[in-house]
Amino acid sequence: MRQRYHCPVELTLDVVGGRWRVLILARLKEGPLRYGQLRRLIPDISEKMLTQRLRELEADGLVLRDATQEPELRTDYRLSPEGETLAPVLQGLYDWGLARAERTGVDVSFTPPGD
Amino acid sequence: MRQRYHCPVELTLDVVGGRWRVLILARLKEGPLRYGQLRRLIPDISEKMLTQRLRELEADGLVLRDATQEPELRTDYRLSPEGETLAPVLQGLYDWGLARAERTGVDVSFTPPGD
DNA sequence: CTGTATCCGAGAAGATACTG
DNA sequence: CAGTATCTTCTCGGATACAG
């Protein structure tokens, strides 16, 4: 993260910008998810990108990770309190996308986790 | 623009994603601006990027451009009605950035056009 | 299942010079 | 002032293979 910005929006972009971060956050906004679930819900992301972005979101304090080995390897990701403060932003992005899709006749789906 | 998305947020990103588009839109949200003003308000953008992004925003129907030759060359950019629908999203990004800056002690400025 | 490590390419962006 | 045109650089992300 930089130390100076010419606009608050610039700072926001630094934290949630890029192709994947808000997609991950938008999913976690609905509730905790496992690594594999995230991968299925965001079909075009590669494992490398998913892991990389999750690590960055953790480092930035937006996402919490808890892993257990017992009885088997299992990792859950969820929004931290700081991450929850993004909820209105994420909702705004979601709502606008939906409205825009209706105006332009584009197809959007939003598959729920469904395990 | 693609024809299918797995999440409405994905569509939104397709339109306003990338490093510069929302910065330009956030500025235009405050009112019409000339090319040179935008360049000064977004100091790190290159002329090439500014022109390129403005053309894309025009093509996507978010920004309107009106140029006059008389009495001298002058071009104004402003949000279209469709672009105005992004106002809540832009405001959300702005507000979150400002709040995050306060929490993390980072410096943000938001210079008004001032000509 | 939950990841790491490497290698590679495309596209985004930067620098600079030039134009009506 | 408001751009174009080129050329180069570099970051992001894709593909694939491997590991606890």
Image (cartoon, coloured by chain):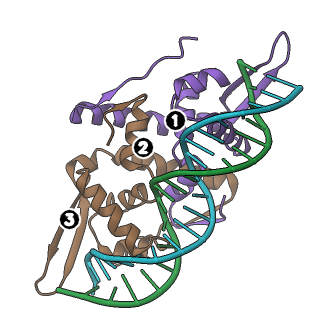
Chain colours: A brown, B purple, C cyan, D green
Whole-Å distance between the Cαs marked 3 and 1? 31 Å
Which three-letter amino acid code belongs to the residue tagged 1? Leu
Q: Position of residue D3 (x, y in %)?
A: 75, 33
Q: Residue at x 38, y 41 (%)?
A: A12
Q: Quadrant of residue A64?
A: bottom left
Q: Amino acid at mark 3?
A: Arg
Query: In the rendered image, which residue does mark 2 sit on?
Result: A13
Say which element carries label 3.
Answer: strand
**Of the residues under marks 2 and 3, which one precedes in the sequence?**
2
- For the residues labelled 2 and 1, say whether their Cβ atoms are less than 8 Å apart: yes
Circle 3 residue: A65
Drawn side of residue A84 relative to residue A6, left or right: left
Q: Give amino acid for label 2.
A: Leu
In the displayed structure image, the side of residue B6 where residue A30 appears, left or right: left
Q: Chain of mark 3?
A: A
Label 1 Cα crowd, 10 Å radius (few <14 / some 14-19 / many 20+): many
Q: Dot 2 lies on which element?
A: helix
Which chain letter goes with mark 2?
A: A
Q: Quadrant of the C terminus of chain B?
A: top right
Disc sitting over residue B107 in the figure: none
Could you say where residue A99 lies in the image, as x and y percent from the top left? Answer: 58, 50
Residue ID for mark 1: B23
For the residue labelled by badge 1, is the local secondary structure a helix, a strand or a loop? helix
Q: Nearer the viewer, residue D5 or A36?
A: D5
Q: Are marks 3 and 1 on the same chain?
A: no
